[in-house]
Image: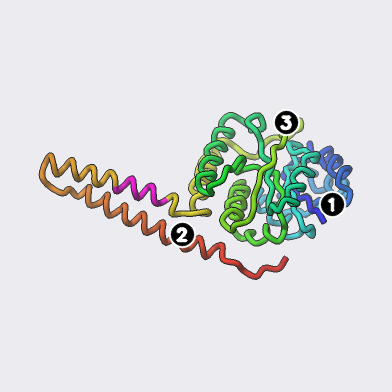
Amino acid sequence: MLSIIIPAKNESAALGLFLESLRGKYRDAEIIVVDDGSSDQTSDIAIAAGCRAIRHPYSKGNGAAIKTGARHANGDVLVFMDGDGQHRPEDIPRLLAKFDEGYDMVVGARDGAGQASFHRGFANGLYNRLASWMVGRRVKDLTSGFRAARREKFLEFLYLLPNGFSYPTTITMAFFRAGYSVTYEPIDVQPRMQGTASHIRLWRDGIRFLLIIFKIGTLYSPLKLFAPVAMLHAFIGVGYYAFTFLSHGRLSLATIFLLSSSVTIFLIGLVSEQITQLMYRPTERKP
């Protein structure tokens, strides 16, 4: 059984046409619309379209809506889509076809034209390159909200997912860290339907998205993030020691600080690596 989960907040302008198209193509699928505390008719529109509507009493965030939908879904495969009309129902079969090849999660990868803005595209490019370095495999779209995953494996990491917009990053790195198979399928992203607007604000969420870079490292392999920083401190410390010794014939306090901080940072990374391994320890979870 297929479950399609759509987080939505004040998407009444686009949701009706989108659900009509989705329901027409996937009559046997379970379609769940999670209304994240909307002030419009989002829930009513979902019910009128023959979908399950689950409403949060107040806005909790996109990630929280995803978690609510996953908990209530009955399908063996979960498909996550946005409710603003950007994701095309026609692309779902191509994502699902990848499961026959043994993949556990398939992500719809946007091209440069599918990014909301130049700034978002530039930031996503940085995230993709960093994630690719961390996992040793090309990550084509780390933050895409259009993806399909096996339900039993997705639920394993539900407790790790944040309530905000960075859930795609978290679940992607969690799947890689656990050794599950992840692949990317190119998709076409449509312009937002008239009357809809992004809930992401550049300045409000800018720092939050920058923190994703550090979260990528700590989720997958903290030592890969901490070790270069420790080496940089050690390199500067040794260099400054050579400078002060040759110039003044002494060992400076700055050199001692840099070298000691290098060791401290490396040890923090080592401990973080062990903690991360405990986070991904196999556990008994009910499907």
Q: Report which residue position mark 2 lands on.
A: 273
Residue drawn at point x = 59 percent, y = 33 percent: 121
Residue 182, relative to residue 116: is it above or below? below
Helix, strand, or loop for circle 2?
A: helix
Identity of the amino acid at label 1? Ala
Residue drawn at point x = 12 percent, y = 39 percent: 247
Residue drawn at point x = 64 percent, y = 50 percent: 182
Highlighted magenta segment, given as a residue range: 226-234
Q: Nearer the viewer, mark 3 or mark 1?
A: 1
Going from N to C along the chain, the mark reached first, 3 or 2, is 3
Q: Report which residue position mark 3 lands on.
A: 191
Going from N to C along the chain, the mark reached first, 3 or 1, is 1
Q: Report which residue position mark 1 lands on.
A: 29
Q: Position of residue 251 (x, y in %)?
A: 15, 49
Specify whether residue 37 is in view: no
Q: Is residue 281 left or right of residue 255?
A: right
Q: Main secondary structure of the magenta part?
A: helix
